[in-house]
Image (cartoon, helix red, strand yellow):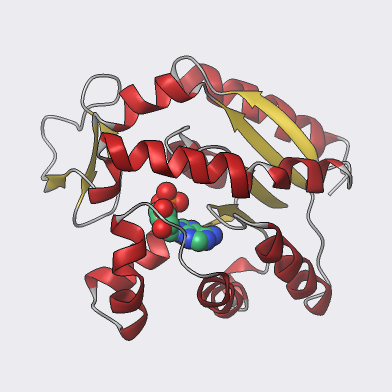
Amino acid sequence: MRLIFLGPPGAGKGTQSQHICADFGIRQLSSGDLLRANMRDQTPLGLEVTKFMNNGELVPDSLIIDLIKDELSKPQYKKGFLLDGFPRTIPQAAALDSMLIKMNQKLDCVLVLEVPHELIISRLSLRRTDRKTGKSFHLIFNPPPADGDFDLYQREDDKEETIRNRLEIYESLTKPLIKYYSSMGLVHKINGVGMLEDVYDRISTVLDRMTKSNIY
Ligand code: AMP
């Protein structure tokens, strides 16, 4: 199964992705996690993208496309993948189309997680991320287990002003992808408001139906 997960930053894609991948036996590929790992390790790419990421801006298409091309060619994605955070622009989606043609693979589904912007702002400003694992928590709705050994921090791009900028970028550059993939008949919209488990039920209903009818 090959999925794309679309939705505004902070809609809960990362958390839901982990459940989907565990249940459906596919690999998550998060472009944001890959970039943050490069920043943490201070690779040349990491140094190049730091300014964009801290300001909540998109990194240039050419950089992210090369990064994803390298990553997707690894054997662990052969059985299927869930793309979280990529593509985010029409040129990225077109580049992904060409990559998949070369790999003789096709997309099965594009999930779009829908959450109102005001709710996202209140969620993200209370999000904290573990420095070691990259796992994220919400201080009220999804707090870290009390017995865990976490080194939590607030991502620079989770500050309110930056969040508003990221949401504007989502509206102008990423939302057009919904139309792009709708024209291919791939889009399933999911209401992302509510408890994590309820949202996951909505997602797994769609994916179970796909699995049962063997359309992937
Ligand atoms: P995320 O963790 O998906 O919210 O991504 C965090 C940041 O990484 C974004 O605000 C961008 O700066 C950068 N980023 C992640 N994925 C992409 C992408 N597909 N295209 C451009 N920039 C990206």
| x then y, percent, for residue 153 | 15, 45
Q: Residue at x 48, y 32 (%)?
A: 11
- 145 or 45: nearer the eye? 45
**Side (left or right) of 156 relative to 85:** left
Q: From this view, report whether residue 143 is shown above or below residue 46.
A: above
- 172 or 132: nearer the eye? 172
Q: State which quadrant residue 152 falls in.
A: top left
Q: State which quadrant residue 6 falls in.
A: top right
Q: From this view, report whether residue 151 is shown above or below residue 16.
A: below
| x then y, percent, for residue 60 | 51, 70
Q: From this view, report whether residue 190 is shown above or below residue 132.
A: above
**Side (left or right) of 208 relative to 174:** right
Q: Residue at x 26, y 31 (%)?
A: 125
Please indicate, yes or no, whether residue 179 appears anywhere in the rendered image: yes
**Side (left or right) of 149 relative to 11:** left
Q: Quadrant of ligand 1?
A: bottom left
> Number of callouts in the render?
0
Q: Residue at x 29, y 48 (%)?
A: 157
Q: State which quadrant residue 131 falls in.
A: bottom left
- 4 or 177: nearer the eye? 177
Q: Residue at x 57, y 70 (%)?
A: 61
Please indicate, yes or no, whether residue 211 appears anywhere in the rendered image: no
Q: From this view, report whether residue 159 is shown above or below residue 81.
A: above
